[in-house]
């Protein structure tokens, strides 16, 4: 299934438990969702993965570049796949598997549309947290015909110096989707960016009880500010809500059914944060928050069409409880 199909699937709230994201044993090859028999459509092997999708211009054609960071007993691994956006054909795929005895920086030559593409990476100074994606001290760059197609990481200047590439004047890459996994008992934290090149925020998801009748409550905080609160979660285990981040509306979809009613301790909740570049979705909506102290950001009346100009960035979080 193409990455565009995956993005569309993210927006179908009633199908959130059936996201088409099943990975092979090596954590690289994306296969059809029907192969998975695990709760939430997520295999155990995919729990240590972060998947980022960028839309880029390559040789005048629109492409999707998927970057998968993964971690196993041998260390951190990296997979890059380039896909034609229109035909959905995979143009090339390369795996970078640094080990304890290999250099954590290097380059590879790829071929796309019968043209040479140069891949450069430097993870020698990379700092990692609990997840597989580096936090800082790295770069990953793709160059074609002397132009930088895509560069990620905080060492972008070093990447340009290493490659001698120039920035394209007609197009820039757009970060359109990220998918990752969080683990915890009650509180789950991550860093979140809700639009391309936007500010990086501290995101916290908390699920707790009120201590009186053990009625669970769900809270979402951004930069220590509570932006969403849902009480009586046993009755509202699925839903959607709209918040404002950096002046932009962000739709939040949640499905915590497996947390509350799952028979297996392996169940996960799913959260989708989808930014909307248009403020029109804020109208003709109703408030879902149970707390009058929280600003009354309204809930979206419909999921909308991701192909419209208002469609922005999607962050998908699989949240696992460690009992």
Image (cartoon, grey):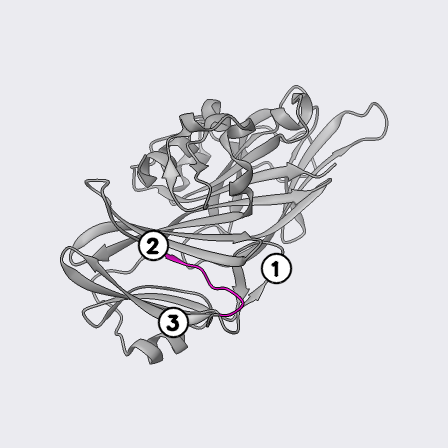
Q: Distance of mark 2 from mark 1, alpha carbons?
A: 25 Å
Residue 229 appears left or right of 18: right
Residue at image coords 55%, 57%? 74
Q: Is residue 97 magenta?
A: yes
Image quarter of the N terminus = top left
Name the spot of residue 284 as percent of width and height, x first: 45, 27
Compared with 187, 109 (above or below) is below
Name the spot of residue 73 as percent of width and height, x first: 58, 54
The foreground one among 13 and 258 is: 258
Circle 2: element type: strand
Disc marking residue 106:
3
Q: Is residue 277 visible?
A: yes
Residue at image coords 38%, 40%? 30
Residue 263 appears left or right of 91: right
The foreground one among 250 and 105 is: 105
Q: In which quarter of the view is residue 116 placed?
A: bottom left
Disc marking residue 265:
none
Seen as rendered, the residue at the extreme front is: 101
Residue 181 appears left or right of 62: right
Seen as rendered, the residue at the extreme right is: 212
Name the spot of residue 174 as percent of width and height, x first: 34, 54
Q: Is residue 317 visible?
A: no
Magenta region, residue range: 95-101
Disc marking residue 129:
1
Compared with 128, 21 (above or below) is above
* Residue ID for mark 2: 174
The foreground one among 26 and 54 is: 26
């Amino acid at each position: 299934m193409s990455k565009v199909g995956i993005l569309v699937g993210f927006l179908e709230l009633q199908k959130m438990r059936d996201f088409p994201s099943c990975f092979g044993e090596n954590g690289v090859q994306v296969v059809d969702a029907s192969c998975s028999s695990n709760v939430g459509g997520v295999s155990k092997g995919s729990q240590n993965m972060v998947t980022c999708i960028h839309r880029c211009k390559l040789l005048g054609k629109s492409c999707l570049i998927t970057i998968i960071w993964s971690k196993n007993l041998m260390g951190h691994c990296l997979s890059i796949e380039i896909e034609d956006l229109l035909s959905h054909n995979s143009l090339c795929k390369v795996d970078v598997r640094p080990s304890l005895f290999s250099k954590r920086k290097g380059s590879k030559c790829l071929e796309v549309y019968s043209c040479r593409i140069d891949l450069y990476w430097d993870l020698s100074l990379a700092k990692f947290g609990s997840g597989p994606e580096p936090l800082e001290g790295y770069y990953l760059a793709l160059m074609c015909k002397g132009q930088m197609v895509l560069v990620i990481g905080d060492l972008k200047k070093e990447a340009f110096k290493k490659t001698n590439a120039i920035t394209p004047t007609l197009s820039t890459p757009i970060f359109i989707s990220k998918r990752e996994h969080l683990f915890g008992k009650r509180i789950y934290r991550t860093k979140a960016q809700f639009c391309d090149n936007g500010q990086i925020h501290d995101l916290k998801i908390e699920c707790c009880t009120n201590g009186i009748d053990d009625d669970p409550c769900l809270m979402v905080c951004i930069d220590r500010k509570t932006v969403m609160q849902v009480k009586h979660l046993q009755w509202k285990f699925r839903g959607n809500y709209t918040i404002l981040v950096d002046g932009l509306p962000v739709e939040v979809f949640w499905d915590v059914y497996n947390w509350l009613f799952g028979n297996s301790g392996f169940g996960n909740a799913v959260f989708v944060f989808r930014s909307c570049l248009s403020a029109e979705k804020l109208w003709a909506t109703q408030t879902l928050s149970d707390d009058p102290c929280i600003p009354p950001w309204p809930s979206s009346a419909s999921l909308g069409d991701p192909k419209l100009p208002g469609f922005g960035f999607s962050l998908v979080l699989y949240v696992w409880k460690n009992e």
